[in-house]
Amino acid sequence: MGRVYNFSAGPAVLPEAVLQEAQAEMMDYRGCGMSVMEMSHRSSMFDDIIHETEADLRKLMNIPDNYRVLFLQGGASLQFAMIPMNLMKNRVADYIVTGQWAKKAWQEAQKYGKANKIASSEDKTFSYIPDCSDLPVSPDADYVYICENNTIYGTKYKKLPDTKGKLLVSDVSSCFLSEPVNVSDYGIIYGGVQKNVGPAGMVIAIVRDDLITDDVLPFTPTMMKYKTHADNGSMYNTPNCWCIYICGKVFKWIESMGGLAGMKAHNEKKAAILYDYLDQSRMFHGTVVKEDRSLMNVPFVTGDKELDAKFVKAAEKAGFLNLKGHRTVGGMRASIYNAMPVEGVQKLVEFMKKFEEENL
């Protein structure tokens, strides 16, 4: 079996050029006689890798000098605790709950202080982004938290909420590097890399300097302090060396695709192909309100669970993998991250049309 079209929500498809480069360097990285997976993280060779990776990310995202880039382990889920531990000085924070991951972050924060749910879209199965133009932001809130792209439900903030001067913290795991962002809009912007940027096992947190202090909740473990990692260049302990190395290659690939502006155009083109079909199909339909649709994750249903299951099975047989929707919502979901080629979406739509004709 050759390469399939992998629509997994994460771990997800990676650029073939990156995989081929890693394959070529697997046994011997640049003449050093060993793999990156084997080398010491304290070696000058790995030091070059991590510094170049950070420099390339700073260039891609135009990260201001007063922000630190941290390569951390524990995934986005560990950030659900790390953020309140480091930021909840007043023991108050506001959360906008637009999906399962924002909800989990809000629930975790309740262990450390008063976590207010100031807006939610749970009333309609998270199928939209609530109006965030005039939120009841708490006067003493340390920050306002959002999950910017909701992987399971396929929604995306098209405009950041008005936090009324409060610090904005955003989980961008499933839209990381899919389009240009203004890093200065955030206090912390972070993402697990296994969806859109690299292999599983790491989160990249971009944290404003003034938020990196020793003034954290008293019981905060050493490993959970941003300052620990910032002071040690993300190498307080052994980092995820392989993941950093692959992310670095992905950053160079994105640059070759025209940077984040080029990536956005690429992603809009793919999403349009699939959404345009869903909007005119008699069998399949999307589940998200049009104005809040994600470019990355596209959930859709037939309205018949048995037909959904038949489609997923037939699609897999045809080489379109991981289209089954998340267990909490059912149906189907196509994750069309940066590395998914336009051709993959075109072929999926062709297959859907054929399935529709044969099963209506």
Image (tube, helix red, strand yellow):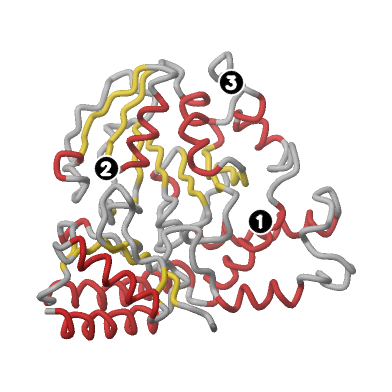
Q: Would residue 204 be found to the left or right of residue 152 on screen?
A: right
Res 108 seen here:
yes
Q: Give residue 301's position: percent from left, percent from top.
A: 20, 63
Q: 239 or 216: nearer the eye?
A: 239
- Closer to the chain start, of discs 3 and 1, is 3
- Name the residue beneath numbered marker 3: 220
Give the labeled residue for mark 1. 244
From the viewer's perspective, is residue 320 above or below residue 163? below
Task: Identify the mark at residue 306; answer none if there is no mark.
Answer: none
Q: Amino acid at mark 1?
A: Ile
Up-down relation of residue 278 to residue 208 (above or below): below
Q: The N terminus lies in which quarter of the figure?
A: bottom right
The numbered mark at residue 98 is 2
Contact? badges 1 and 2 (CB < 8 Å) = no
Disc 1 to disc 2, C-alpha distance: 30 Å
Based on the displayed image, in which of its 4 quarters is residue 351 positioned?
bottom left
**Tag 2: amino acid:** Thr
- Mark 2 lies on a secondary structure that is loop
Q: Quadrant of the C terminus?
A: bottom left
